[in-house]
Image (tube, coloured by chain):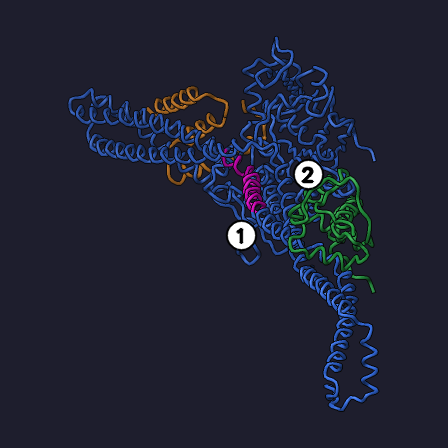
Chain colours: A orange, B blue, C green
Amino acid sequence: MTSAAKPKSDDQFQSLLDTVERLRRDKFQQLDAGLVRELLRLHSNGAAADGELIRGVEQAVERHLTKEG
Amino acid sequence: MLQLKALHVEDFGPFKGHQTIKLSLQDGVTVIYGENMRGKTSLLNAVRFAFFGKVLGRGTKAMSLHKVGNWEQAAKGTYGFQVQLEFKDEDHEYKLTRSCRPRNGVSTPSGDDDYAVDYYLEKDANVLGPQQAEAELKRILPEQISRFFLFDGELLQEYEDLLSSETDMGRRISEAIERILGVPVLTSARTTLLRLKEKSEHREATAAQGDQKTREFGNQLADLHAQRQVLNEELQRLEGELDSMRSQKASLEEAMKKKERVAALLDKRETLDRLMREIEARRALKQTELQQAMSGAWCALLADPIRNATKALRESELALQTELWREDVLRGLQAHAGSECPACLQKVSSDARKRIESSIHGASDKERAEKSRELAALRRKLAALEQHAGAARTDVLRILWEAVEEAAVDHAAKKGERDEIAKQLESVDEESLRKTKADFESTIRHIDVLEKGVAKTRASLDQSKSDAENIQKRLDKLAGGNLGTERRRREMFSDLHRLFDEAVGAYREQLRKRVEADATRLFKALTTEPEYAGLRINDSYGLTIVHQDGSDIPVRSAGAEHVVALCLMGALQNNAPLRGPIVIDSPFGRLDRGHTKNIVRALPTMTKQVVLLVYDDELPPDLARNELKSKLRGEWRLERRSARHTALVPRKD
Amino acid sequence: MATDKKTIGITKANAAALAGLVSAGRFGSELDAAKFAMAYAIKAGVTAGSTDGAETKWNVGSVDPDGSMRSLLEALCPESAEPYRLAEHLMNEGIKSLAVKIGASGDLYETLFPAPPSP
């Protein structure tokens, strides 16, 4: 339910993403930046149910794996 | 961000009938003035009730809703109350209405069970469905973080617990802080990825079972994964139980803290009872001694008459005695005629002899005997006077008397003190105090058992994981079937999990630094002590005052505690995605003018909308006007109509 | 010579006041209180008289076992020929005026330990 009209919330997302992205660049270059960003986005919606989250993450990773071949 | 527009209360606490307070949407502070018992806390509670359906008593204890309705209305047979809150959030207009009414069929409610609490939420004039309404409210202001928006002095005091990692209250507040700061986004990602990593490991093991070469390892791994699953479930169960036990301990701790004063009073009452018994025994002993001594008190009254009578009788005695002696001498001289005078050893002349004879002529033997009797009677009286004069010991009496009086005064003073304590303890349920203590102890024991269980399960889990890792390594050297795909998936989840695991720690570290910097900036504006250089944050977001020489200021007063807590509030508001209004009840009660001024001036920088509930002495209106200037957005007053009826009126003076 | 009394009594009206004196806790017995009242009356200047209608309370033997009280009264009030009759009168008078005084000040302290006259 996070909407684009929540600038402060976006600030926080950006701040979380910056932290994760810096770590990815430094230590986990094998991971795709887009995928990591997508996973973080999925979790920043606090109201989503656990099952929904797991499915979302699983699908994102599967899509990525398929793309990679 | 959330902004409050208006609060409508109906029969809520002292607010009889329907009353409204309007709040400005412009940045700044609204001050609501009310003397004690006029309903400041009720107003804060009205906001709390609207959002969460809860009303808190002093501190954090939930209050019975049955007691919240207006008493004057209840006396007339009208029960229940309603609160409506109008607010804005992200360009949407909301109207939240929550009511507490007697259940159908209940005409005279006697407890909370007799009421039903209902609410509905309108968004841009459309009533939302129950699920949607709940989700919206959770998003707009989650209850777990409400403490950063709606609080009073007592709640501020709790932040001290963040300094010691031991208390469960501290743990709970830390969690709430992380929640408002967004750490759960990362921790929930980490949890999801862990579960998916384990799932992918299991998929790989299953794939390995399908191939002759890898079957053995696949079987072993599958067994270990099954074991891990069981252990994980057990760990989750134990941790869940531990969590609820810890919150129970925290509320018991809170209850005990509140009852500390009561426990001290009980001890004091016991001591006074013992002292009173001792004093009473001492008084009774002295009283007996006094009573014995009082049998001679009557003589003390007669001291003067006895002295006077003794003097007179002594004179009579002397006169009588002299007279008798004289007679004896004369008779002796007459009897031994011709001999010398016994006094001057001269011959007694015949002239003198004649005179002697004539003087003893009238004194017969009878008369002499009479005089002797008179003398004896006189002496008897003198002896009696002497005896009773001796009994008149006023000094001893006075000492005893004063000892009795002193004991009585002492007793009365102690009794006064005891009665005062008894009055304070009148409404105290001593049984519940004992029960709280016992519950607390049993909770601690339970937590201990659970903690050991968690540690043991973790160790088993670690063992199982390390066994699985060893087998996994051996399996990694082999290939076959569709193992490659499963392996790639598993590796990816594993990497993702590690990435987010490290991100949690890194992000926390950043947050602490930011909160520390913001809190320090605020603290420097608020403190009146120039030697204080700032605040230092610990792992659980506890803040310590730092002196300019770099040392920590170890002890701080309740007032300092409030200042530091307010700095934390400001810093959190600044770093949290969720910003909203702050409603504070009597925050300046423990602060001097200097701090009050600084805080009032700083409030508009902490968040956009602030509602202050104060009494005139705590924040004089002139001070508020001078410090806030154009940031003062409204002044209201809680005006007394009767003991149970307060009116909300705009302040105009 | 008239015969002195063999018993000493307290009038009905004074009996309650006497009991009140004792219940205030300072005296160990009614006799101690009655003697105190007697002394109080002497100090107030009563030196003669008799009380009618007193109900016997004590034998003189228990009031004055060694006869010294009688001698004292003879010394203090020489004009009285019947010391025990006088004692009875003094006790009753004393009780009456003490009751009035105690009623006003509430305590015997000032009676017993009068403040020294101010210079």
Give the residue type at disc 2: Pro
> Residue A2, position in %: x, y?
54, 24
- Quick check: is B160 in the magenta stretch? no
Q: Is residue B256 magenta?
A: yes
Quarter-wise, where is residue B607 in the image? top right
Image coordinates for residue B179, horizontal then vertical, percent: 51, 32
| Chain on which label 1 sits | B
Camera-nearest residue between B421 and B163? B421
Image coordinates of residue B614 in percent, x first then y, are 71, 37
Q: Name the residue under label 1.
A: B554
Hey, which residue is sitting farthest bottom in the picture? B346
The amino acid sitting under disc 1 is Pro
Which x, y percent locates residue C106? 75, 46
Tag of residue B433: none
Secondary element type, mark 2? helix
Q: Main secondary structure of the magenta part?
A: helix
Q: Which quarter shows the N terminus of chain B?
A: top right
* Residue B128 visible, this angle: yes
In the rendered image, which quarter is residue B624 located in? top right
In the rendered structure, are the residues bearing label 2 and label 1 in contact, judged by CB atoms less than 8 Å apart? Answer: no
**Pointer 2 local density, CA inside 10 Å: few below 14, some 14–19, many at least 20:** some
Identify the image quadrant of residue B643. Answer: top right
Left or right: where does residue B233 sit relative to residue B125? left
Magenta residues span B252-277
Residue appearing at x 55%, y 37% in the figure: B259
Query: Is residue B76 shown left or right of residue B426?
Result: right
Q: Identify the subunit bearing mark 2.
A: B
Instruction: Please give the residue where the numbered disc 2 appears in the rendered image.
Output: B604
State the CA–CA distance, disc 2 to disc 1: 30 Å
Of marks 2 and 1, the one in the foreground: 1
Is A16 on the left or on the right of C77, as rendered?
Answer: left
